[in-house]
Amino acid sequence: MATSSPSKSAQPIDALIVGAGFAGMYMLHKLRGLGFNASAVEAGSGVGGTWYWNRYPGARVDIQSLEYSFGFDEELEKDWRWSERYAPQPELLQYAEHVAERFDLKRDIRFNTRVTAAHWDEAAQAWKVETDKGEAMRCRHLILATGCLSIPTDVTFPGLGTYKGDIYRTSRWPHEGVDFSGKRVGIIGTGSSAIQSIPVIAQQAEQLTVFQRTPNYSMPAHNGPIPEADFQAWAKDPRAYRAASRDTVGGFQNEPSEAMATATAPEEIRAELERRWAWGGFRILGAFADTAVDPEANRIVHEFVAGKIRQQVADPAVAEKLTPKDHPFGTKRPCVDTGYYATFNRPNVELVDLRAEPLSGFTAEGIRTSAKDYAFDAVVLATGFDAMTGAIDRIDLRGAGGRRIKDHWAEGPRTYLGLMVAGFPNLFTITGPGSPSVLTNMINSIEQHVEWIADCLVSLKQRQQTSIEASPEAEAAWCRHSTEAVTPTMLPQANSWYMGANVPGKPRMFMPYAGGLNTYTEICRQVVAKGYEGFIIRQGDRVLSESRAFTSQPAPGEIPENLLPIIMGRLMAAGLLPAE
Ligand code: N01
């Protein structure tokens, strides 16, 4: 860490925000409005985060735009009209730019700058921050708005450097776009990024070859203009609409049903799933209350989706390859597509099953599998992200006593409420690991976090308190509660990025909080109402308030009788309940 800088002797600013995506933008706006001296640092040359970087063809949001947009400002809300149910990336980026302009955010954002190190200075009660531009800054509070899916995995392939064609990553797409006309294109991966881009690339390229290792579940978006009735339902009271979205498990309206698939007649199941499939997107996830827990209920939904894949794909052998088999429905993040399965009916599209013919590497001409060589003019890597911890891990982040975050998280990311980390005073994460984040509508989760952090900073300031940090006890209790929330479900059964399973050597731990945004919000509220329960608050080296326990857990809801044995069995097997 540099020891000299022009700003070294200056007073630390109140808050430095890392990242100028939706989280960083709102945090900056909120803190400035409350009179704090805040600024942001952003690696990209513009605002928008995810929507700045992911410019691949077909990129669009998979939560309805009426819900996936800021609700903190009524005028902003009224002035903006989305063109489609699921806005495309260029429109989302335009929205981010509009927000930045409207609230004059850019004057306090340093672009093209990446934070490389941040060390807590106990004596000064401030963070010393360094950037890749050699700047040194000091701030009282460091707020990481670094995104959950912002750092691509380091995936590489033997011979990649010898390949003579073009290589593109979906998450680092050229700003000027790519013209695949007349080109032979290969794409590796079949996650959300690939599933959105494949139909669009297939329309342009001469030939598209899709290299699939694991098939995913994908539901149709049925995208188009927002139906007038939906818009009116929103427009008659956007406040109430937002509140209803926030008061859900996923942060978006999904018609959650309490019906059990295992206790419903087959024809009723079919009708309900058909209705939700026709509505599109994630609506099918709310069809039955037992799908995420009971393997039999899950199998019922799986069979329905497998049937839909067979209906859409003309060649039964290709349909079979596209049908997921290694993970239960919903345990990896499902995708929402526009014409994905039907794309495999095109004569210029080929599917290569990497389980049957493993990928050996690249040649000068293209890709080699155990079965043959494929020649390409361009290859697209849609190979995913070092999710949730990737961006934080890449900062040399050291808390009290010089403890590194990497060491603190050696067995997986441990946080209190996904907001703070024990031993890292005045460090906040927006939608960090341990919070509902990626299991929800991110904008609603972001707004909840930003507002919680802003309230916390106001409270500290009013009481002239200089630091706040999670107690180790509360952090441990939160981790245990998070484990209790996910263990009854089948979510940990998949090798998903939620589990860190897509990054070799990454500890396996279910990283987001699976208890639901509504429950989580209530817990955060209770924690504050109890005087920041679970936090240690100081003035200099004097401890002013110390509450080490975390007791704000929700009372367990009533568990449907037929799920009780499964849930209890899983909790016991995980050692979370005493075995009888
Ligand atoms: O990444 P992924 P993504 N050889 O990790 C394959 C969000 N998102 O960028 O499953 C061969 O899902 C890998 O195969 P496997 C959303 O939350 C949202 O697509 O590991 N294949 C997989 O198929 C999403 O979940 C939207 O066997 C390799 C693919 O690459 C998250 O971002 C749009 C490989 C990676 O899929 C990530 O999605 C886009 C290898 N060595 C993304 N390594 C919206 O709609 C990896 N793969 C808003």
Image (spheres, rainbow, N blue to C red):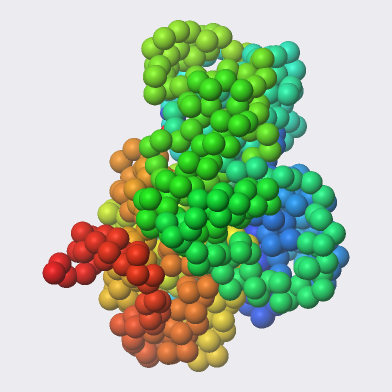
Residue 401 occupies quadrant: bottom left
- Residue under the point 67% across and 19% down: 346
Task: Give the number of marks.
Answer: 0
Q: Residue at x 75, y 17 (%)?
A: 181
Q: Is residue 183 visible in this depiction of the protein?
A: yes
Q: Position of residue 44 (x, y in %)?
A: 64, 46
Quarter occupied by the C terminus: bottom left
Q: Which residue occupies 37% across, 45% down?
A: 494
* Relative depth, front residue between 175 and 76: 76
> Nearest the camera: 455 or 346?
346
As drawn, 411 above or below 530:
above
Left of 198 or right of it: where is 465?
left
Q: Is residue 455 left or right of residue 230?
A: left
Seen in the picture, residue 145 relative to 61 is either above or below; the reply is below
- Pick the front one: 521 or 292: 292
Q: Residue at x 68, y 59 (%)?
A: 68
Do we see residue 394 in this rendering? no
Q: Quadrant of the N terminus?
A: bottom left
Give the image location of residue 469, x and y in percent: 39, 76
The picture places residue 386, in percent across and down from the top left corner, at: 45, 44
Q: Position of residue 22 (x, y in %)?
A: 65, 59
Rendered position, 315 above or below 216: above
**Left or right of residue 28: residue 415:** left
